[in-house]
């Protein structure tokens, strides 16, 4: 119990239990996350860590002192302390409440958040996805076009993300390898083309109207309850596009195996229709008929790396997956499991202008 870098707030009381929840341990901006149970209550402790020498974490997840960096280390505590993380709360999407924060001797920021309860996104049904997406559409439609002046908000996040994806998709992929043939030939051809043209795909996506985006909306960051939804992890928040967050939610609902890929068509329909319903209710003045295209453009651009990374690693190493989280099988099982997902990405890419 004495290993915590800072004492808990008074609302927690005496520490009686500490658990390290599942998270991306390779992210250099994260110095640790703990769920702390106390005699008076519970709270989550997170450490936002500045760049170190030598660098901390995984090379795929560097951090920076530059407020414009896609993974700026101070962004999440600033999102909570400034109130930006509560920007969707009027629309039924809350963020955890900030209990306290403090600076550590090494320059890190320790911040305490209240514990979120409810049904996790990993247990959601299509109706839950629709209800959440509707509220997200209402929030982002209402915030569309407004100025966001905080210098630490992310900007052009998608381009920065896609530019670094060769860190993951680092193999010269043999798209005709025997392992790859579980995917239809036209899917493999389209995925190879998508990977080669990924920066052009980003430009298509960035044509969408701008709004305040969370940029990490996926089932591990979501909880539902009878009173609404809670969205965790605001480390990437900033200017994004209409359709960017729902695209991520659709694709990343099944990537790590928490929900079956067989549910993907229902999830896609639920999120897309719910988001459009929310935009309509918000008074969004853009073209609702273009929203599905924005979602497809963002999904294809952001996840252009997925197929070459998964296939390349399976061929080169005989394994795949994140050691920190996910439900995994053998390389052959994973490639088979992901067939429906990569087929959807190939179809999304085919639907884009100029494809």
Image (cartoon, rainbow, N blue to C red):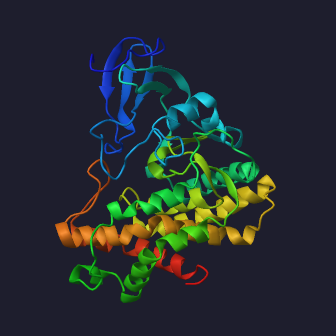
Point out residue 54 in the picture as x, y percentages from the top left corner. 26, 39
Which image quadrant for residue 35? top left
| Farthest-out residue, left | 317
Q: Nearer the viewer, residue 281 or 212?
A: 212
Q: Is residue 253 visible?
A: no
Q: Is residue 126 left or right of residue 122?
A: right
Q: Nearer the viewer, residue 66 or 195?
A: 66
Point out residue 314 in the picture as x, y percentages from the top left corner. 23, 69
At horizontal 54% and vertical 72% (from top left) the residue drawn is 201
Relative vertical location of residue 115 with respect to residue 353 in this rendering, above or below: above
Relative vertical location of residue 340 with respect to residue 325 in this rendering, above or below: below
The total of numbered circles placed on residues is: 0
At horizontal 58% and vertical 28% (from top left) the residue drawn is 81
At horizontal 26% and vertical 51% (from top left) the residue drawn is 323
Q: Is residue 290 left or right of residue 177?
A: right
Q: Quadrant of the N terminus?
A: top left
Q: Is residue 166 visible?
A: yes
Q: Quadrant of the C terminus?
A: bottom right
Relative vertical location of residue 143 with respect to residue 259 in this rendering, above or below: above
Point out residue 18 in the picture as x, y percentages from the top left corner. 31, 25
At horizontal 69% and vertical 51% (from top left) the residue drawn is 140
Point out residue 144 in the picture as x, y percentages from the top left corner. 73, 53
């Amino acid at each position: 119990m004495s290993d915590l870098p800072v004492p808990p707030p008074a609302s927690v009381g005496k520490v009686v239990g500490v658990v390290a929840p599942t998270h991306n341990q390779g992210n250099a901006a994260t110095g640790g996350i703990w769920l702390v149970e106390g005699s008076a209550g519970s709270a989550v402790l997170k450490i936002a860590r500045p760049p170190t020498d030598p660098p901390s974490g995984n090379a795929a997840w560097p951090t920076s002192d530059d407020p414009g960096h896609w993974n700026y280390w101070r962004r999440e505590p600033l999102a909570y302390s400034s109130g930006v993380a509560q920007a969707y709360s009027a629309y039924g999407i809350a963020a955890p409440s900030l209990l306290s924060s403090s600076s550590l001797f090494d320059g890190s920021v320790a911040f305490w958040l209240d514990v979120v309860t409810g049904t996790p996104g990993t247990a959601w049904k299509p109706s839950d996805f629709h209800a959440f997406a509707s509220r997200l559409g209402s929030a982002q439609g209402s915030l569309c076009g407004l100025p966001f002046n905080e210098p630490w908000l992310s900007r052009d996040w998608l381009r920065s993300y896609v530019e670094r994806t060769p860190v993951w998709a680092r193999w010269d992929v043999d798209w005709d390898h025997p392992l790859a043939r579980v995917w239809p030939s036209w899917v493999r051809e389209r995925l190879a083309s998508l990977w080669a043209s990924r920066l052009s795909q980003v430009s298509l996506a960035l044509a969408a109207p701008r709004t305040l985006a969370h940029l990490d909306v996926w089932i591990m960051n979501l909880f539902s309850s009878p009173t609404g939804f809670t969205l965790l992890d605001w480390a990437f928040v900033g200017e994004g596009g209409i359709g960017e967050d729902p695209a991520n939610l659709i694709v990343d609902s099944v990537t790590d195996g928490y929900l079956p890929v067989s549910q993907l068509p229902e999830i896609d329909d639920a999120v897309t229709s719910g988001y459009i319903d929310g935009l309509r209710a918000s008074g969004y003045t853009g073209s609702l008929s273009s929203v599905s295209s924005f979602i497809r453009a963002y999904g294809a651009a952001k996840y252009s790396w997925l197929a070459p990374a998964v296939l390349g690693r399976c061929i080169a190493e005989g394994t795949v997956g994140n050691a920190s989280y996910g439900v995994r099988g053998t390389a052959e099982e994973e490639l088979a499991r992901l067939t429906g997902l990569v087929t959807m990405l190939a179809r999304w890419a085919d639907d884009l202008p100029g494809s």
